[in-house]
Image (cartoon, grey):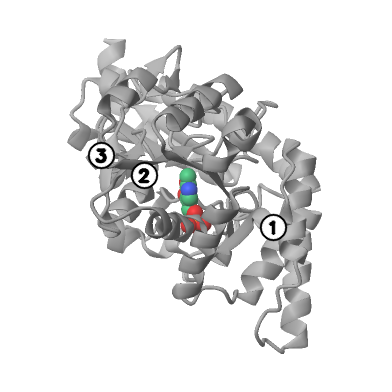
Amino acid sequence: MFDFDRVIERRGTHSTKWDMIAKLSGIEAPDALPMWVADMDFAAPPGVTEALMEEVKRATHGYYADTGSWAAALVEWMKRRHKLTIDPAWVSQTPGIVSGLGLILQATTEPGDEVVVFPPAYHAFRKIITANDRRILDVQLVEKDGRYCMDLAALEARLTPRTKVVFYCNPHNPGGTVWTAEETRALAAVCAKRNLLLVSDEIHCDLTLDGTVHVPALTAAPEHADRIISCFAATKTFNLAGAHAGACVTPNAQLKQNLDQRIMASGLSSYNSFGMIATEAAWRTGEAWLDALLLYLARNRDAFETRIKEIIPGARPMRLASTYLTWVDFSGTGLAPEDVADRVASRARIFASPGEQFGPGGATWLRLNIAMPRPLLDEALARLAGAFEDLRSQTRR
Ligand SMILES: Cc1ncc(COP(=O)(O)O)c(C=O)c1O
């Protein structure tokens, strides 16, 4: 019903993923393949294209009137997909999640305050914290039974009187860990005990694979809902990152008021109509597309994980329970991280996200985005096979 195998030429279309390769990675080859930023190479759900076409055909593009239908679409989606009840009055709209995180910091903390991050963690967490003159407090994730776990004793031990906020990514990027209700509840309990705000970035919540259930922070720890801000968006789920529309959701009216004040002070309370139309249409019409996408992604993941271990002896992908961002440890190859990076960039002509970008614990890893049509994924794997050919011959000897 949906053709995820179709290769869409994205070069020369203002695609960050494709058109910024040379500038950001130094890979000049014209056939370079991007496996870095979290953006898929699939066409968005047909209902999104239709809604945008209607707008384009009308050709009047004045200010967007927020009638409440966007928040209603989000509320209905979260209820249907995640059994989470949200009151539309809890929803603050932001031009994306990262901008929302910055606004949250401005609304709730002072320069010099500390924000907890669980590395390896989404690199924009680090950037937005430091760009706002706040400080990163790293609490290292530990790997247990092939998945990440939070060390809450280490968290408690590291907290200082300046620690005010926890940035927590559920599901986690990178690694794709889907936190259990118990894990989130335990984290929220520490936040309550130590008077911290818990910001739960759930942008990847729709992208759980193999039927794994995402538990929203507000569901896992309703007793601490007053200190939780959850961030949701349709943009990762439906490949609409350019729409730049996200939501910060909190049942704490005072917290919401402070956040809305920052949104207003930044002149952000008028929305981009194309982004609003696209993301609302996605929530309203995209469910069958998403179900098909998840099956496609799971097949890509299975193919990638099987092949990468065969073609690069010692490479170890973390089993992805969610997201399309594979996370591969190359420490078992015996190669230095610079050698691995050079083979991937120069020999395979692939732009992967360097693990060190994700903070402590990432140095020997690469993050590789597999949300691409199968012919492109097969091409990427063939190139990687060539780039590490000598390792295979050594192991055969
Ligand atoms: C965990 C996480 N949060 C936020 C974002 C980006 O959100 P936005 O584009 O809405 O700022 C990403 C994108 O990769 C992400 O992985």
Give the CA distance from mark 3 to mark 2.
Answer: 8 Å
Instruction: Please state if 250 lies on the left or on the right of 265 as rendered.
Output: right
Mark 2: which secondary structure? strand
The x and y percentages for residue 122 are 39, 43
- In three-dimensional space, the C-alpha distance between marks 3 and 1, rounded to whole angstroms, equals 47 Å
Q: Which mark is residue 352?
A: 2
Residue type indicated by callout 1: Ala
Dot 3 or dot 1, earlier in sequence: 1
Residue to which mark 1 is pinned:
89
Any atom of ligand 1 within 8 Å of the CB at mark 2? no
Which amino acid type corresponds to the residue marked 3 in the rendered image? Ala
Q: Secondary structure at mark 1?
A: helix
Which residue is the site of mark 3? 341
Q: Nearer the viewer, mark 3 or mark 1?
A: 1
Q: Residues within 10 Å of mark 3 (few under 14, many from 20)?
A: many
Mark yes or no: residue 296 visible.
Answer: yes
Residue located 50% across and 68% down the image? 261
Give the quadrant of residue 361: top left
How far, Cα to Cα, is label 1 from label 2?
40 Å
- Kindly state the secondary structure of the residue where label 3 is placed: helix
**Label 2 sits on what residue type?**
Ala
* Disc 3 + disc 2, Cβ < 8 Å: yes
